[in-house]
Image (spheres, rainbow, N blue to C red):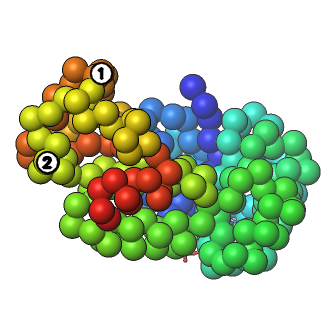
């Protein structure tokens, strides 16, 4: 089981802690604000009040012992950058830092972050694509070109099998799963799988091929 060091317990950090706790991961949560630390206690294995820009404080935590260190500080970029770079200097295995602007992402990557998350931008892209068509229920970008889309089964596909439709050859997309009433109904798709009405499918392909295939 992976262990996490989570620094910065604002709204973003708090959501991360809640989710990791739900998934049963061990989380050490850190913030300089005592109230934030107290509020996270039900969702963290351990929590400490402290300034993550202090080398002494971070050394005492033993950052090497965590599989992933997440720097969820947002507004205070100076703190975020100092924390990120200190974590790496102290031997952290993997540092994931939060960026609020493109330029911040660059600086963080140059100063110790192994990966950057960019919540505002990532959610903005998701929101734009998700609501660009009534037929899209969900979307996950995979690199620059590829994506998984959850889309409604087109009317002219209902009742036909994947083999009959020849989806891969004709449209260059892969149907990975079928969902009904928001729940996964089938995750093993074969040429004989018949597509039901009132359902959605998860398709993997290039964004272009998917958009062309489903007219979205
Ligand atoms: P969010 O957008 O996640 O709600 P925020 O806008 O409330 O965050 P930020 O400045 O992004 O506030 O900081 C997030 C959290 O990180 C805050 O709870 C803050 O106390 C904490 N934090 C900021 N700097 C440090 C630091 N040097 N050491 C420890 N915690 C810090």
Q: Is there any visible trace of residue 57 in the rendered image?
A: no
In the displayed structure image, the side of residue 26 where residue 171 appears, left or right? left
Residue at 63% across / 75% down in the picture?
A: 100
In the displayed structure image, the side of residue 4 where residue 40 appears, left or right? left
The tag earlier along the polypeptide, 2 or 1, is: 2
In the displayed structure image, the side of residue 123 where residue 5 appears, left or right? right
Quick one: which residue is furthest to the right in this view?
89
Residue at 68% across / 59% down in the picture?
A: 116
Q: Position of residue 85 (x, y in %)?
A: 85, 59
Mark 1 lies on a secondary structure that is: loop
Q: Is there any visible trace of residue 213 in the rendered image?
A: yes
Find residue 139 and name its label: none
Q: Is residue 216 above or below residue 21?
A: below
Q: Which residue is mark 2?
A: 156
The number of discs equals 2
Residue at 51% across / 34% down in the picture?
A: 25
Label 1 CB less than 8 angstroms from ligand 1: no
Residue at 87% across / 42% down in the picture?
A: 91
- Is 85 or 104 nearer to us in this picture? 104
In this rendering, which labeled residue sits more in front, label 2 or label 1? 2
In the displayed structure image, the side of residue 54 where residue 145 appears, left or right? left
Q: Residues within 10 Å of mark 1 (few under 14, many from 20)?
A: few
Mark 2 lies on a secondary structure that is: helix
Q: Position of residue 186 (x, y in %)?
A: 23, 27
Q: Position of residue 157 (x, y in %)?
A: 17, 43
- Is 185 or 85 nearer to us in this picture? 185
Q: Is residue 83 above or below residue 152?
A: below
Q: Which residue is mark 1?
A: 190
The quadrant of the image that shows the C terminus is bottom left
Q: Is residue 95 above or below residue 175?
A: below
Q: Position of residue 54 (x, y in %)?
A: 83, 62
């Amino acid at each position: 089981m992976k262990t996490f060091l989570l620094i910065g317990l604002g709204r973003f950090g708090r959501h991360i802690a809640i989710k990791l706790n739900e998934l049963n991961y061990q989380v050490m949560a850190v913030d300089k604000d005592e109230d934030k630390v107290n509020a996270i206690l039900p969702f963290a294995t351990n929590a400490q009040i402290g300034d993550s820009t202090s080398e002494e404080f971070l050394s005492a935590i033993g950052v090497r012992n965590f599989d992933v260190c997440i720097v969820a500080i947002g507004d205070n970029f100076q703190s975020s950058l100092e924390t990120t770079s200190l974590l790496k200097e102290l031997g952290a295995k993997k540092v994931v830092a939060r960026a609020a602007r493109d330029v911040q992402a660059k600086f963080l990557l140059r100063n110790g972050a192994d990966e950057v998350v960019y919540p505002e931008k990532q959610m903005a892209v998701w929101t734009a694509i998700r609501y660009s068509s009534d037929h899209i229920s969900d979307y996950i970008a995979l690199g620059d070109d590829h994506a998984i889309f959850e889309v409604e089964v087109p009317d002219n596909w209902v009742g036909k099998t994947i083999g009959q439709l020849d989806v891969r050859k004709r449209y260059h997309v892969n149907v990975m799963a079928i969902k009904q009433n928001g729940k996964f109904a089938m995750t093993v798709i074969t040429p004989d799988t018949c597509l039901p009405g009132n359902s959605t499918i998860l398709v993997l392909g290039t964004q272009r091929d998917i958009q062309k295939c489903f007219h979205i």
